[in-house]
Amino acid sequence: MPACKLCGRSFDTIADLYAHLRSECGKMPRSRKCPVCGGKYHSIRLMRLHLINEALFDTRHMNYLVSV
């Protein structure tokens, strides 16, 4: 039986596992949300890149990075 490595749930077929990964486990947790604008990202690395890139153009993001 194939199982999801993210949540441990087991499935009858590999197709069911892939459907689960695309729909349920593919959803991003709230912890990977930009603290300034609320944008959601698939990884913390992408969120950090977002903060750095936006700091070049947006003073809210720049002020957040300076204050941390």
Image (cartoon, rainbow, N blue to C red):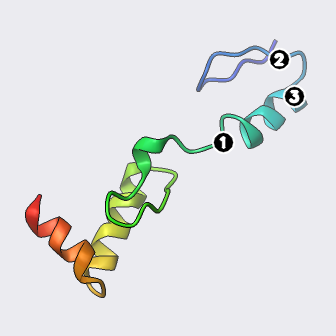
Residue at numbered disc 2: 11
Q: Is residue 51 left or right of residue 8?
A: left
Distance Cα–Cα, label 3 vs label 1: 13 Å
Label 3: few (<14), some (14–19) or many (≥20) C-alpha neighbours in 10 Å: some
Residue that label 3 marks: 16
Q: Are marks 3 and 2 in contact (CB under 8 Å)?
A: yes
**51 w.r.t. 59: above or below:** above
Q: Position of residue 3 (x, y in %)?
A: 72, 18
Mark 1 touching mark 2, by CB under 8 A? no
Q: Residue furthest bottom?
A: 57
Which of the numbered marks, if any, corresponds to residue 26? 1
Residue 28 percent coordinates (x, y) = 56, 45
Left or right of 24 in this view: 14: right
Q: Nearer the viewer, residue 29 or 4?
A: 29
Q: CA distance from mark 1 to mark 2?
A: 16 Å
* Spot occupied by residue 66 in the image (x, y as percentages of width and height): 10, 69
